[in-house]
Image (tube, rainbow, N blue to C red):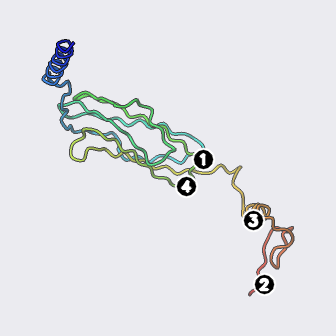
């Protein structure tokens, strides 16, 4: 019985030593340089709720594969449509696909997309775009409508202070 457990322990120790002495399967990937087409973009105005499809062309200028392991966006209104990691071979071109939904934005918006990988110098590439999101004129309320909604929301009944709510304006008597 003791010989059997001794042999099992020796075999387990031998297997552990063999496994530890085998070379690792990991290959070190060196930093590489890239070129991004239109890294800073300016789009024509769009209506609120429209979507933009952004395709950034990325060229690997180096001698090692480019591996983009993580992509972060500055807003939850953008979705990256690529499976990570994105691998672009040396001297080849690949694309980063991003879909932007403007439903929660109004006015001039600027967004950033950060790509992390074995990119020379900083380890990241920054992609930028801006667009002016215009609200649909059918849904833009004027001041009187906003004021009436505010009063209804807060349960304010009757005349405005020294004014008349039925006529839709406010009169201030402190002249």
First in residue order: circle 1 vs circle 2: 1
The residue at which mark 1 appears reads as 48
Dot 3 lies on which element?
A: helix
Judging depth in this view, the residue of 144 and 82 nearest the camera is 82
- State the residue at coordinates (19%, 28%): 27
- State the residue at coordinates (37%, 47%): 40
First in residue order: circle 1 vs circle 4: 1
Q: Where's the N terminus, which quadrant?
A: top left
Q: Position of residue 73 (x, y in %)?
A: 43, 45
Q: Are marks 1 and 4 in contact (CB under 8 Å)?
A: no
Q: Position of residue 10 (x, y in %)?
A: 15, 18
Q: Position of residue 8 (x, y in %)?
A: 20, 15
First in residue order: circle 3 vs circle 4: 4
Instruction: Specify whether 24 is left or right of 112.
Output: left
Q: Quadrant of residue 152?
A: bottom right
Q: Position of residue 155 (x, y in %)?
A: 81, 64
Dot 1 lies on which element?
A: loop
Query: Disc 4 to disc 2, how far (Cα)?
Result: 35 Å
Point out the residue furthest to the bottom here: 175
- Circle on res. 107: 4
The residue at which mark 3 appears reads as 147
Q: Are marks 2 and 3 in contact (CB under 8 Å)?
A: no
Instruction: Specify whether 20 is left or right of 104.
Output: left
Q: Quadrant of residue 168?
A: bottom right
The residue at which mark 2 appears reads as 173
């Amino acid at each position: 019985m003791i010989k059997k457990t001794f042999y099992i322990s020796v075999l387990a120790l031998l297997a552990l030593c063999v496994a530890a002495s085998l070379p690792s399967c990991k290959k070190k990937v060196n930093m590489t340089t890239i070129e991004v087409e239109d890294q800073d973009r300016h789009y024509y105005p769009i209506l609120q709720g429209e979507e933009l499809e952004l395709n950034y062309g990325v060229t690997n200028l180096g001698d090692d594969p480019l591996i983009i392991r993580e992509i972060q966006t500055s807003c939850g209104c953008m979705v990256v449509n690529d499976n990570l990691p994105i691998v672009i071979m040396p001297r080849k071109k690949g694309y980063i696909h991003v879909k932007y939904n403007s439903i929660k934005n109004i006015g001039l918006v600027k967004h950033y997309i950060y790509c992390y990988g074995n990119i020379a110098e900083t380890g990241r590439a920054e992609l930028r775009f801006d667009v002016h999101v215009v609200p649909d004129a059918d849904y833009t309320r004027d001041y009187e409508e906003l004021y009436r909604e505010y009063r209804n929301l807060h349960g304010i009944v009757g005349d405005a202070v020294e004014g008349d709510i039925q006529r839709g304006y406010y009169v201030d008597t402190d002249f």
